[in-house]
Amino acid sequence: MSLIQHVSVPHFRANWGRSALVIGGTATGVALIVAITIINRSVLENLRNTIATIAGPAALQVTLGTGEIGFPQSTTDAVRQDPDVVAAIPLVRGTLTPMRHPEETVSLFGVDLVAEDDLDRYQLVLTTDRRTMLDALTDPRSVLLTERLAHDEGLKIGDAMTVSTPSGIVSLTVRGLLAADGLARAFGGRVAVMDLPAAQLLLLKEDRIDQIDLIVGPGTDVDRVRDRLRTAVPSTLSIDRPARRGVIFDRILSSFQALLTGLSLLCLVAGVYIMYNTTSTGAVHRAFVIAGLRVTGAGAKQLFRLLMCEALVLGVLGTALGIPGGIVLGRALVGLVEDTMGVVFQLRFPVETLTIAVRDQLAIGVIGIAATLFASYFAARRITALSPLEILRADLRSLAVRTPSRRLVMWWLGLVAICAAALVLEIRYKSPAWGNFASTLWFAASIVIAVPLVTFAAPAVHWLLDRLFRAAGTMAAESLVRAPTRTGVTVAAIALVLTIGMMIASMAHSHRESVRQEVLGGVLTCDLAVSAVETEGGWLERPLPHELADEVRALPGVAQVETLRIVPGHFHQGARVALVGMSSGLSDPTRFPPGWYQEGQAERAAPALRDGTGTVISEAFADRFSLSIGNDVDLATPTGVLRLRIVGIMRDYVSDRGALWFSDRLLRERWQDSAISWLMVSARPEVPLATVRTQIATALGERHRLKILSMGELDAYLTEKIDQAYAFTFAIQLLVAVVTVAGVFDLLLAAIWERRHELAVWRVIGADEHTIRRSVMLESAAIGGLGCILGVVVGVVTTMIWVYAHYRHLLGYYLELHFAVGSTLWYVALVMVMTVVAGYAAARHATRQSVLEGIQVE
């Protein structure tokens, strides 16, 4: 305690910047892990609460997929025949968009409002007279709003509410208000309730429902009822407890949560490395103090414990800042993550409250403190093991932790081998956990190889600097050669920033380019793409009535109209895949450029697609279920199992878990769905595109809110959605970059501080200030250049690992690799400017001190 009082406290005060950097590195790593953990828990907990709220008192639910397409309402009569079923309540779900606030979304539920028991079962408490409301239900445009929604929209009973729906723009009359209880609490209270038949018409689900809630008698064996009902309804429907749906969504989201965990692990590696660098530098700078304490009687073990106690204090402070900082960061990032998940899964994930588990925070706190102690251990052991005489005679740079380059190369080869084995296991078992392990290990391996890289590159750097810059270059090269460990440490820190930036930018760029090739270069090519303005989560727009296609075909400027219907929520063998129904013209072989099919040929696939016997599947679907051309795939439909022959495999990005493309006639016949997602319009050659756009807007614009986009505008729209999906990753990258840049500045400044005696001697023998400053800046630029080379090489391999292996098993997208060359060049320029500026600042500091002060003995 005496040493802490008389040695540690004065050191913290005198070197508060370096101490702050250690605390900041710990706090950053802890905050990111805390934020990701809170977001993961909050999304799942809020999703479970929403499912439970919607389910109300139901013991069982009958569903098909996640409710985007529905199943026949007649199923309700079948389940009502069971003697233990007290009530079978059909529901339909969808979204409305208020025209006053088109950026907002309202969740619409269709229930049997005439059955008063259903209102009570879902705790739908009317704040108005129930009889008056029921009398008004003869009007199919009647709606009940929650009190919160009515307040937000400035509405009262009797007012009209104009909304955009799948069936068009309609005016609804507010007939009653619902208290904030039961079903009305879901989705933040932005809920509207309509009578079931009226809601079905608005949502283009006539005679179809999304779920049946089953209420059984007290003491009934629910599992036995479920088993009986499975024989009474089509085998393609799911009958399970509401809580089971929460488990299903847990499984759907697990891969995305693994992605978040993987990114946080990369950030933790960067944070630990910065802490290691900073504590190593600090220990070296205190070497003379340590030697003096050894001379006056302090033991090596005692001083080692002192340095570790200091690390413990800094780790505790960093953790204490990181946990609340992570909570704040979680609040800031949760909206971005919601948007990302909406784009990826085409589902809404409203997070109304953050779920903060104390046990998680304690565990993360222990990790943060342990990381600081681990980062400090090696430097503390190295400095305290040296004899005082070794320290007093040595150049400061020789006191840093040193490991022979040959040993480091062996370590690197071992890490790379383990990383390769983990990638093989990830691909074989489709395991995100092995993928996270592999990517983190490769990231760490890039640090290990930095010192050997500097050692091997030193002769070439020495020759280049000597030839180009003569005396100043020679001084810079000699400094690099004499301190390969210090140079390698700084090079690795620079490479970390560049690798993370390059990987994230290349992932986003690969996604953009892959989608652009699909949309603009193949089957979806047209002059204008027409869809609803509103989406139902993510990028996919709300469906439109099929009759619009006939209206558009009749316009004078239109040559051809093809339609596309995308249903994202179909379950196949436990995975949530997409169904894509396309009109016959979209199967025309001329629409498929060479190389579009990964397997198969468009000419052979077209007849089977047109007659409804075949399907083209995405590469992700084929890989996930081990399918190839000629295999059959069985799809669960409301009317029974549909068997299709696989006639082609292509790269597709409609769904994260794969998609099946087939004739839209099958959707109408087997799923009883006639809606459309997009109209692909081709204009007559002699008619200007602007004229055709105007014709479509004039014919349909008063009844529907439409997007009418050219191919370039569609590309911009999808690019915006992809950038929205990656927004949270750029926020994480920025945080890591700030801390790492601060660490690089500290390393460069520390390196010059260690050379102040040498620089003073140079000035004594005749070197002017200009030469000294030039030498220091050249040294910094050389370090920055080596860091960029390592960062680009590691970034290329890291990006390839994520695109070709990790990303496929995390999110399911089989992207084509496109390096973000522009972003990489920007990052390289930023790194070079950063290192040169740091070198300039250090050079000015070095030449400001007097020569006598520089050459005096410590």
Image (cartoon, rainbow, N blue to C red):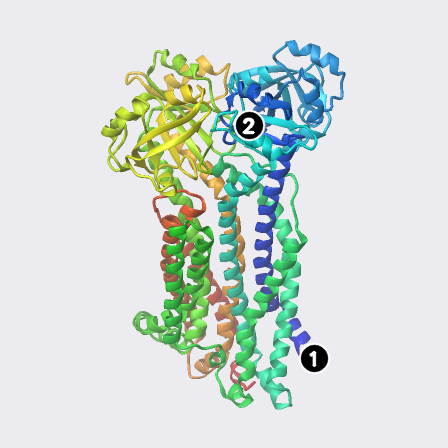
Question: Of helix, strand and loop, which one carries label 2?
Answer: helix
726 in relation to 299, above or below = above
Closer-to-camera residue (470/284):
284
Q: Is residue 724 left or right of residue 786?
A: right
Residue underneath mark 1: 6
Q: Is residue 820 visible?
A: no
Q: Name the front one of labels 1 and 2.
A: 2
Q: CA distance from mark 1 to mark 2?
A: 78 Å
The numbered dot on residue 504 is none
Q: Is residue 105 left or right of residue 547?
A: right
Tell me residue 298's x, y (percent): 64, 87
Q: Quadrant of the C terminus?
A: bottom right
96 in relation to 470, above or below = above
Residue type beneath disc 1: His
N-terminal label among 1 and 2: 1
Closer-to-camera residue (80/254):
80
Q: Is residue 852 visible?
A: yes
Closer-to-camera residue (461/253):
253
Image point (40%, 72%), residue name: 408
473 in relation to 387, above or below = above
Closer-to-camera residue (377/94):
94
Image point (68%, 74%), residue name: 9
Image point (76%, 18%), residue name: 128
Question: Of helix, strand and loop, which one carries label 1?
Answer: helix
Tell me residue 725's x, y (percent): 48, 41
The numbered dot on residue 229 is 2
Tell me residue 322's x, y (percent): 63, 57
Q: Locate residue 722: give its quadrant.
A: top left
Q: Quadrant of the N terminus?
A: bottom right
Residue type beneath disc 2: Leu
Q: Residues within 10 Å of mark 2 (few under 14, many from 20)?
A: many
